[in-house]
Amino acid sequence: MTNTVAIGIQWGDEGKGKIVDLLAPKMDVVARFQGGPNAGHTLVIGDKTTVLNHIPSGILHADTLSLIGNGTVVDPFRLVEEMDMLLAAAVPVSERLRISDRCQLILPYHRALDAAREAAKGKARIGTTGRGIGPCYEDKTARRGIRLVDLTCEDLDARLDENLRYVNFMLTEFLNSRPVSREEVTEALDLARERLLPLAADVTLILHRHIKAGDRILFEGAQGSMLDVDHGTYPFVTSSNTVAGAALAGLGVGPGHVDEVLGICKAYTTRVGAGPFPTELYNAEGMCDAENSGKHMAERGHEFGATTGRPRRTGWFDAVVVQHAVRINGVTGLAITKIDVLDGLAEVKLCVGYEKDGKHLESIPADCNALETCTPVYETLPGWSENTFGATSLDQLPDSARALLRRIEEVCECPVTMLSTGPDRDHIIHL
Ligand code: GDP
Ligand code: IMO
Ligand code: MG
């Protein structure tokens, strides 16, 4: 038995979709445990690109069951769209997918609240994906959320009336926004009833049957550790726990069922949305370093959000972030992606510590403002001019690229077990 949690350990978009799709043929089950349509996981197989928001990245494999766990939030419109996209590509999604009847539904008023709150915040906005994630998790915690199973409950109408009264008061009185109609909500619920309820199941029970049979499970995270609501750059985070531990609560399994934690990170760093980013070099607001290294990463790495299309901010690999992630997740191996994007840079830097007010910081400060004003301490390594794109063995890499990997392993105190050299499923080196 080797059950693996695969998670992002930076600020999201580390290449989780690619790595999970690659590992999926060895897995009997791939299960998502948190997040929702804020995620955008890209799978590239030959000339075909698939972007998944809710559906686990193992869905393209015939012998792998895909599960959406109780810890997730599901938007009926978007999930049905995603299912239809797969059906159009001849993927028998109804046979391969089950959705927890306990998962929370994102309803039109969650999206309206998300948008209105961001607009009201102005310059202080978080830069959310606008998918209603925060308001939906808020309702879950406040115990007024509507779950998939609640579509069959008798008191649904009364609960919705109550929710709409509250939401529309907030929207119109506090947020200077238009109210959400009952019809908009009914449309979402009807769609969920028609297309999602037939796939609803006790996902925890299904998972445990597979565990009992000795099957292999892959727990697929969304977002990244620095976006975790407890351990990330609060308040510039998402509204769920994104760490490996969330796999347990988000699916209903005990800690003894996890054998490995694969921490996925880029060979540099990106972030989309607002919030501190100590090693940032380049962004759409005009920030640019003298050597244009950040621009090189953005352009060569095609750094645009898979969900929103927004340009991503780019910067050097931050080992303080990865050390933090190794600790809070119990990472047993690193999967480094996009090493090919660094091809052609004369020098490559690693941030190995922060300084603040003349003092060395050992870990990430809890206060966002303190993190914002930290100065990164860099180690500079030689870059390389060779092409690593698509390499499939370590001996195809230049010495400098190998030296970078060794240094990452030393500084982060964690072995690199996979190295991704391009977007395609086949662009991989197993170490
Ligand atoms: P996720 O959210 O973690 O699944 O990552 P995204 O799909 O949002 O973003 C990762 C992007 O990088 C996608 O466009 C991938 O196709 C691409 N990608 C993944 N691994 C590599 C790699 O090793 N090299 C290059 N050049 N692109 C990669
Ligand atoms: P994947 O799974 C990158 C970011 C948003 C914003 C913050 C809060 O593809 O890695 P939210 O809509 O969740 O309330 O937004 O979190 N964010 C992501 N950034 N990748 C993601 O998912 C993200 N999901 C949310 O940009 O800064
Ligand atoms: Mg993504």
Image (tube, grey):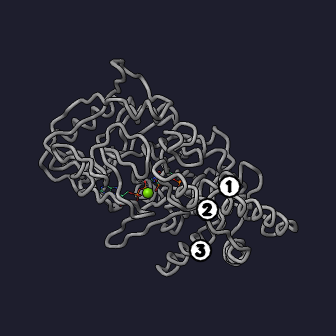
**Disc 2 and disc 3: Cα gap in Å?**
31 Å
Q: Closer to the camera, 354 or 98? A: 354
**Disc 2 and disc 1: Cα gap in Å?**
33 Å
Quick check: can you spot residue 68? Answer: no
Task: Give the residue pinned by disc 3.
Answer: 80
- Kind of element beneath mark 2: loop
Quadrant in the rendering for residue 193: bottom right
Taking the spot 36% from the left edge, 48% from the top edge, the residue there is 270
Query: What mark, if any, has residue 332 been given in the picture?
Result: none
Taking the spot 56% from the left edge, 74% from the top edge, the residue there is 83
Q: Amino acid at mark 1?
A: Asn
Indicate left or right for 124 with 169 as reference: left
Task: Indicate the position of residue 342 as horizontal and vertical percent values.
Answer: 22, 48
- Kind of element beneath mark 1: loop
- Please tell me how crowded label 2 is: few (under 14), some (14-19), or many (20+) other residues with Cα within 10 Å: few
- Kind of element beneath mark 3: helix
Taking the spot 60% from the left edge, 73% from the top edge, the residue there is 77
Q: Closer to the camera, 212 or 225? A: 225
Task: Indicate the position of residue 266 as horizontal and vertical percent values.
Answer: 34, 47
Query: What mark, if any, has residue 70 been given in the picture?
Result: 1
Q: Earlier in the sequence, mark 2 or mark 1?
A: 1
**Is label 2 or label 3 in front?**
2
Q: Quadrant of the C terminus?
A: top left
User: Label 1 near label 2: C-beta < 8 Å?
Assistant: no
Q: How many marks?
A: 3
Residue 396 drawn above or below residue 159: above
Residue 309 drawn above or below residue 207: below
Task: Indicate the position of residue 102 as horizontal and vertical percent values.
Answer: 73, 58
Q: Amino acid at mark 3?
A: Val
Query: What mark, if any, has residue 176 been given in the picture?
Result: 2
